[in-house]
Image (cartoon, rainbow, N blue to C red):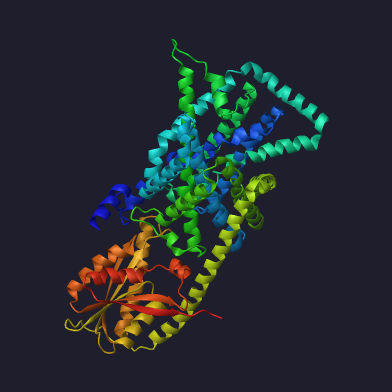
Amino acid sequence: MKIWRRLRTVLLGGEKDVRDPGTFHRMALIAFFAWVGLGADGLSSANYGPPEAFLSLGDHRHLALYLAVMTALTVITISASYSQIIELFPTGGGGYVVATKLLGPIFGLVSGCALIVDYMLTISISISSGVEAVLSFLPPGWFQYKLTFILLITLSLILLNLRGVKESVATLTPIFLLFFVSHAVLILYGIFSHVAATPTLFADTIRETRQGIQQLGLGAMAFILLRGYSLGAGTYTGIEAVSNGLQILRPPQVKTGKKTMLLMAVSLSFTAGGLLICYLLTNVQHVAGKTLNASLIETLIGTWTIGGFPLGVWLLGIILVSEGAILFVAAQTGFIDGPRVLGNMAIDSWVPNRFMHLSERLVVQNGILFMGLASILILILTKGSVQTLIIMYSINVFITFSLSQLGMCLHWVRTKAPHRGKKFAVNFIGLAMSLSILAVTVAIKFREGGWITLVITAALIAVCLLIRRHYDQVKDMMRRLDDVMIQVQQMAGTHPAPVRDDNAPTAVLFVRSFGGLGIHSFLNIHRIFPNYFRNFVFVSIGVVDWKNFKGAEEIKNLEGHIGTDLKRYVRMANDFGFYAEAIQSVETDTLPAVEALAEDIQRRHAKAVFFVGKLVFEEENLFTRFLHNQTAFSMQRILQFRGIPTIVLPIRVIKTK
């Protein structure tokens, strides 16, 4: 056990103190690091978004100029609309929270499930594309191990994220900067080295557009342009990320979030739009076995030499390696924001409550593992095929975009906030763009395999509905239990607090909030052991989870709430004529705290017997076991191994008709 703990500390790092106000400050990301961690998904799309859009134009390459302008405007518009979402929802949550609050829970569920599947595919396609890019520089024989490399990289990123968000982002920052700086310089060089062609570029574009309309018709030309526009939709998939991840940003979160959004919008519109213009200016051609970016870089700098040294070849290799590596950084968006969407959905009982739990490193550990394992499953099923993953990708994010923009439009219609007309216009334009891209993308990709994404999303929605139904039944039973038990508790007489009897047995009861579950367990002890226990110790261990992980002040509020509930339990025991005391603690994990507290309690109460309440269902199955943790049995096993008598008290859950 000690060896495992040491290995865990080496791999994941030491425990973080939730009570230390500096912990949250040190973990939070400033705008720059947030740009790295959340903006890499968009920037990495330069490897496949602009090239795919440009190649789809075929012989009508002059449309690339319109495409560049449309791409830049789309990025800026959607970014501006999400800045308004950040202002309206400063606690984060992104598209899921927006759709839930402004459109209703079902719309929120659809948006959340769409995002989760999209983040799974973000991880899968990013890692698969990155491995392919790196393997292109190695001997052909290495390509047979492609899936093995993909799985190793995925497992490494899971481990890196389990250590903490800031640690993972800081590790990958050099790769991000190498990519952005090299491509910014490349784009500027590509444009300024063709300054002579710039004056005629606009005139030639207008002339060729007129010729195309005369030959094919306005509808056909518009279709070609819109098809290219939609096929480059992967460019916009990372814009949602900042509004989802506000909780990990440095306070004030809204200001930091808007700075991050600005950095993302400027860098993404410049990179995507700039590459499209460079393709047009250099008249780059697709070459079999090479990416369009590789052909562009080779055209621009491939022949550079210094004293016979092939500088251009080396720069080409460095830039292409950075393109492969940035895709690994892009997978971070899925690992950072996917667990946060799951955490928010867990608060609303759409997914198991365990997705709210934090590890000792204060990361949403179960969410990270779920996103990583789901991505591994997708990669195995698709054999890491980038072509298959691209078909499945970039549909779901526009479902969330559309629902978010629709919700914001309705909000501005209903509210009387200042400047609502301008704000409505921004979200309405964003809605029109999102819906048009979604419609064209689904139409083009549906038969090719895009339907698989929609089926997976629909299946996830169905599972979430079943989970919510189960939790609602349990909550209904708990409300009825609360009503009955609190009435029973009120029937007890009022007595002065008795003095502790050191010779009498002591019942130690683990409780949570004051309510029917704890009262029922207290009364059950008397029913099973009448007139045996004279002393009671109520123990409550508050768990810091995604819901209350918002700073040291929130931890104090949690401690205050626990203390208030424990006083009510003590008063109840006193009213029944028993001595009682309370012990509380706030932790990220219940079990280690149980072990430490139990040993201390047993030293002070020699005849202590520990009790834990446990919900039991008429039909126990894998579903109920997965939705409800087995903490009670784990506590019993830990304490009994140390010779401490522990009893699990069953509380029956009866289904409502």
Q: Quadrant of the N terminus?
A: bottom left
Using the image, determine if residue 169 lies above or below residue 608: above
User: Which of the pair 151/243 is nearer the observer?
Assistant: 151
The structure residue drawn at horizontal position 58% and vertical position 33%, both measured from the top left corner, is 272
User: Which of the pair 166/351 is nearer the observer?
Assistant: 351
> In which quarter of the view is residue 520 placed?
bottom left
Side of 326 relative to 436 (left or right) = left
The structure residue drawn at horizontal position 63% and vertical position 36%, both measured from the top left corner, is 71
Q: Can I make out residue 100 in this image?
A: no
Q: Position of residue 588 (x, y in %)?
A: 34, 60
The structure residue drawn at horizontal position 60% and vertical position 34%, both measured from the top left corner, is 50
Q: Position of residue 655 (x, y in %)?
A: 51, 79
In this view, the residue farthest toward the top is 307
Q: How many marks?
A: 0
Q: Quadrant of the C terminus?
A: bottom right
Side of 396 relative to 325 (left or right) = right
The structure residue drawn at horizontal position 49% and vertical position 51%, both measured from the top left corner, is 377
Q: Can I make out residue 455 in this image?
A: yes
Q: Position of residue 163 (x, y in %)?
A: 35, 48
Side of 149 relative to 421 (left or right) = left
Using the image, determine if residue 513 lies above or below residue 151: below
User: Which of the pair 419/615 is nearer the observer?
Assistant: 615
User: Which of the pair 620/85 is nearer the observer?
Assistant: 620
Q: Position of residue 417 (x, y in %)?
A: 61, 53
